[in-house]
Image (cartoon, grey):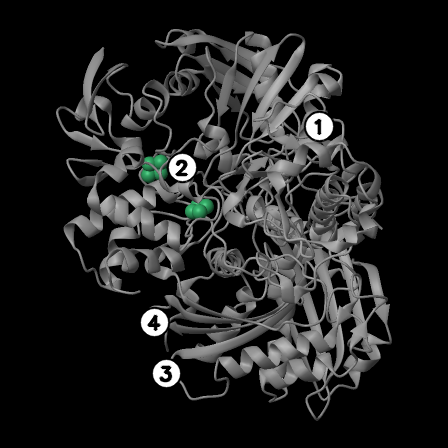
């Protein structure tokens, strides 16, 4: 059936089965391929998007559960003041290796900083432990979050 | 002699062929796109790698696949440096698979830097020489009287200046100079090489632009899922397709007979649908009976039992025998005997295998994340019965490679399905498909015997290696070189090998061979050090001795002096020898691979319940005189170190011929909360620069296990780490 969704501030319609995860609606139906598939079982965080500002795993969130929630994806991250800062820090430190996990990392980091503007190391570990980086860019992810938080030059 | 291939298969078997062909087929500048008839605003192709637009924007082709190693940035940097342009004016594009223009295109063996360091600088310098020649002709002066500033040819005597954009069309019509004849810059003049330059795709990555194979979209594209037997290569006995075809959105389900080659098209059932979710739902609804298969009773337990029998029977075939190990052991002051094991591992690239294929106009066009496009093209041609020239392969960015995408099985599958369907198709594997149809890092068993004299010097070393293979043929990436350290460094040295048949695909995983061999060798060295009461750093320096280069030349030999230098540096930077609290310890290890010399110290603590935390790793590296891009170099080293630690916590096991793990819940990868601090130091030795994708990984594994011994007195001889074996008391 047709679902009315609000994605990155735009009204969109997706005519899909009710059990279709938001991840595949975004990628295949709406053409927003920035959100990534890594595991499909909420283990890797590659599919992280925001629902009303909170990070969710789109791979295990059926489209019928979205309702009126405002969805923000990596393509809309620059529309958030914190998102822009995070993207900037990610660029300056050149965090990525392959880059595949980074949309999910950026969305998790953005949600963290929106909630907690000056996170401790433990806060960062707790908020980011759901996001696997197979290339293991963790050293730079930590540094970039601190830079985005204004905690280092 | 099959086993001798060791590190190389897939990575560098034809290194010589590449070098020989590189001059002729690979790097010859192509001047077919000359200046004539080029519209004023069309960029001019100066050669196969460089286009210059009239506004001075320079487009540089990156020939190799980008898998996260940063090659799409670092190779164009080499050209840009010698072309002498401003990096801000450089755009880079990914080459398609085109062996005629670019020679061999691959991501493997950390070979891109050593193979291209001279050649691509020469390509840039040749382009610059042609721009100089064009300006010289315009101005009626000698080319030798001209110089360049970034993007501009300058005649100092007259003060005349011409931007490259104004010269490109004319330059492109000139004859290219002999590559080896063009002078190269002195390193002191570098403006780009050696600078910390962010990846060219960074902006696209952080904003989520389509870059990866899985992001491909074509008009009218359908989506496919492909079910294969859990026992590798088993055929479809029967398949009930009705339930799959009844799923909304499914267009068609069909059986693929397939063949027997692991890296080609294996038997299975394809489901094609309007969306991937529907395709995969259809695939789950399939009812497939798989045929019995010769390997369906194999298991990890079975391999372990066979290995034990082979060791007990002393059934190894000799690969190397120096001196008289048995006599030396008999006269040793002390002997140590130990069995080591490491498991199968999965590559687990975060982007699962996928491929988009479209058969049109008699040609199969393919978009794939691949580390080795040309063999993929050949496999597709063979599988579909097409002439290779009718298969076109576009390389996309890869969401990780680690060796997995040296095999192109997913390419053959997508091509077959797309041809059958007659529409563009994107095949995407599930994570479960990916983990259960990998080419695994082979497991291995080593039985060591070592002897030391009264002063703690190693007098004998015997390694009975039990690995996989049949007859003379070692399973892929399951070999060990007879020159592997400490061969040639101990007078009485033996390497014997036994092989067991294996029904599981294996292949190179980042630093293949080395990622396992370093663990066992550097651990056993530690055992001998402790047995003789010698400090582990001192023991290593004694073993390396003062022999300098061992072997024929810097490429095939082992430079003990370079290794000793990194060992000393790692020890010094880590404050080796200082006191640490209880259940905290440091371990050191070194390993040479991919032409890189690495020593690493790990500091770990082991909780009372046996949980291991790696706090910090010090890395000392010698990869030659020049770090091309320090920003990328550090990222590769940090990633390799954490990757190595991550590999100590997971394993792939086989039962009933099938892989037991299927996703990140059963095959864990290290997460940010377990990532250590990493401190890296380079020694800039006077050697040509070499690659960094792999060689930092191997030493960290034994550095950690040796640190665990220092912290607990318990020797880890089997991976993965088991907390239960490290509990206090
Ligand atoms: S794809 Fe959703 S958490 Fe991995
Ligand atoms: S950058 Fe490759 S998975 Fe994170």
Element under label 4? loop
User: Cβ–Cβ below 8 Å for labels 4 and 1?
Assistant: no
On screen, residue A136 above or below B609: above
**Separation of disc 4 and disc 2 at Cα?**
32 Å
> Are labels 4 and 2 on one chain?
no
On screen, residue B565 above or below B286: below
Q: Is mark 3 within 8 Å of ligand 2?
A: no
Element under label 2? loop
Q: Is mark 2 within 8 Å of ligand 1?
A: yes
The residue under label 2 is A38
First along the sequence among labels 3 and 4? 3
Percent from the top left, x then y, of residue B591?
Answer: 64, 67
The residue under label 3 is B582
> Are labels 2 and 1 on one chain?
no
**Separation of disc 3 and disc 2 at Cα?**
40 Å
Mark 2: few/some/many CA within 10 Å (<14, 14-19, 20+): many
Choose mark 2 or mark 1, whichever is in front.
Answer: 1
Task: Specify the quarter for ligand 1.
Answer: top left
Q: Is residue B48 left or right of residue B672?
A: right
User: Cβ–Cβ below 8 Å for labels 3 and 4?
Assistant: no
Percent from the top left, x then y, of residue B352?
Answer: 48, 34
First along the sequence among labels 1 and 3? 1
Per the rendering, the mark at residue B538 is: none
Element under label 3? loop
On screen, residue B191 above or below B112: below
Per the rendering, the mark at residue B607 is: 4
Element under label 1? loop
**Separation of disc 1 and disc 3 at Cα?**
73 Å
The residue under label 1 is B35
The front one of B439 and A35 is A35
Chain under callout 3: B
Quadrant holding the C terminus of chain B: bottom left
């Amino acid at each position: 059936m047709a679902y009315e969704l609000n994605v990155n501030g735009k009204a969109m319609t997706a005519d899909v089965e009710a059990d279709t995860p938001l991840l595949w609606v975004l990628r295949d139906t709406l053409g927003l391929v920035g959100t990534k598939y890594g595991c499909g079982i909420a283990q890797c965080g590659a599919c992280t998007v925001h629902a009303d500002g909170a990070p969710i795993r789109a791979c295990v969130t059926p489209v019928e559960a979205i309702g009126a929630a405002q969805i923000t994806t990596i393509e809309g991250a620059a529309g958030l003041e914190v998102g822009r800062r995070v993207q900037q820090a990610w660029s300056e430190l050149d965090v990525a290796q392959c880059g595949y996990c980074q949309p999910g990392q950026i969305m998790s980091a953005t949600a963290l900083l929106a909630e907690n503007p000056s996170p401790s190391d433990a806060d960062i570990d707790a908020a980011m432990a759901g996001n696997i980086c197979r290339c293991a860019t963790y050293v730079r992810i930590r540094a970039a979050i601190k830079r985005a938080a204004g905690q280092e030059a | 002699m099959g086993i001798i291939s060791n590190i190389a298969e897939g990575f560098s078997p034809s290194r010589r062929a590449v070098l020989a062909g590189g001059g002729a087929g690979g790097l010859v500048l192509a001047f077919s796109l000359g200046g004539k008839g080029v519209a004023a605003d069309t960029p001019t192709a100066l050669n196969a790698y460089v286009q210059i637009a009239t506004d001075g924007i320079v487009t540089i082709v990156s020939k190799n696949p980008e898998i996260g190693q940063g090659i799409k940035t670092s190779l164009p940097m080499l050209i840009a440096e010698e072309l002498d342009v401003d990096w801000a004016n450089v755009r880079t594009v990914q080459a398609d698979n085109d062996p005629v223009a670019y020679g061999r295109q691959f991501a493997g063996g950390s070979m891109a830097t050593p193979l291209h360091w001279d050649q691509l600088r020469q390509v840039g310098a040749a382009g610059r020489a042609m721009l100089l020649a064009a300006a010289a002709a315009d101005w009626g002066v000698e080319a030798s009287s001209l110089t360049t500033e970034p993007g501009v040819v300058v005649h100092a005597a007259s003060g005349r200046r011409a931007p490259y954009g104004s010269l490109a069309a004319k330059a492109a019509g000139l004859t290219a100079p002999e590559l080896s004849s063009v002078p190269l810059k002195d390193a002191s003049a570098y403006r780009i090489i050696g600078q910390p330059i962010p990846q060219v795709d960074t902006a696209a990555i952080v904003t989520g632009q389509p870059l990866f194979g899985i992001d491909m979209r074509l008009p009218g594209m359908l989506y496919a899922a492909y079910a294969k037997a859990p026992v590798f290569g088993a055929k479809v006995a029967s398949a009930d397709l009705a339930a799959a075809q009844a799923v909304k959105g499914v267009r068609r389900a069909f059986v693929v007979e397939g063949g027997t080659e692991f890296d080609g098209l294996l038997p299975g059932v394809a489901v094609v649908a309007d969306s991937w979710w529907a395709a995969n739902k259809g695939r789950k609804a399939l009812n497939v009976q798989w045929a019995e298969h010769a390997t369906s009773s194999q298991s990890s337990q079975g391999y372990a039992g066979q290995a034990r029998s082979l060791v007990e029977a002393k059934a190894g075939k000799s690969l190397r025998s120096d001196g008289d190990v048995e006599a030396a052991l008999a006269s040793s002051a002390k002997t140590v005997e130990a069995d080591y094991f490491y498991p199968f591992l999965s590559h687990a690239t975060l982007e699962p295998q996928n491929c988009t294929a479209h058969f049109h106009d008699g040609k199969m066009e393919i978009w794939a994340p691949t580390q080795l496009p040309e063999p993929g093209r050949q496999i597709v041609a063979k599988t579909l019965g097409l002439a290779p020239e009718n298969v076109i392969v576009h390389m996309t960015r890869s969401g990780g490679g680690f060796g997995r995408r040296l095999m192109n099985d997913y390419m053959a599958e997508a091509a077959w399905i797309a041809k059958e369907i007659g529409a563009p198709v994107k095949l995407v594997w599930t994570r479960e498909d990916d983990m259960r149809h990998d080419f695994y890092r082979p497991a291995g068993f080593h039985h060591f015997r070592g002897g030391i004299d009264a002063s703690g010097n190693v007098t004998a070393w015997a390694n009975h290696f039990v690995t996989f293979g049949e007859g003379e043929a070692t399973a892929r990436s399951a070999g060990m070189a007879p020159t592997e350290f400490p061969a040639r460094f101990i007078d009485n040295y033996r390497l014997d090998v036994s092989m067991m048949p294996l029904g599981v695909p294996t292949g190179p995983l980042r630093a293949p061979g080395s990622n396992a061999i370093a663990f066992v060798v550097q651990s056993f060295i530690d055992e001998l050090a402790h047995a003789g009461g010698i400090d582990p750093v001192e023991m290593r320096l004694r073993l390396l001795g003062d022999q300098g280069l061992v072997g024929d030349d810097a490429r095939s030999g082992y430079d003990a002096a370079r290794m000793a230098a990194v060992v000393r540096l790692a020890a010094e930077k880590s404050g080796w020898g200082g006191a640490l609290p209880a259940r905290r310890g440091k371990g050191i290890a070194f390993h040479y691979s991919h032409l890189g010399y690495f020593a690493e110290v790990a500091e770990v603590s082991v909780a009372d319940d046996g949980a291991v935390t790696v706090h910090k790793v010090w890395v000392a590296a010698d990869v030659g005189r020049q770090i091309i891009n320090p920003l990328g170099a550090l990222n590769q080293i940090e990633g390799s170190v954490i990757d190595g630690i991550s590999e100590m916590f997971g394993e792939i096991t086989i039962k009933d011929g099938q892989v037991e793990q299927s996703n990140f819940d059963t095959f864990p990868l290290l997460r940010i909360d377990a990532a250590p601090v990493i401190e890296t130091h380079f020694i800039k030795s006077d050697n040509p620069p070499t690659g960094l994708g792999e060689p930092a990984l191997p030493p960290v594994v034994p550095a950690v296990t040796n640190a665990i011994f220092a912290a607990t007195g318990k020797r880890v001889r089997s991976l993965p780490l088991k907390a239960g074996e490290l509990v206090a008391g």
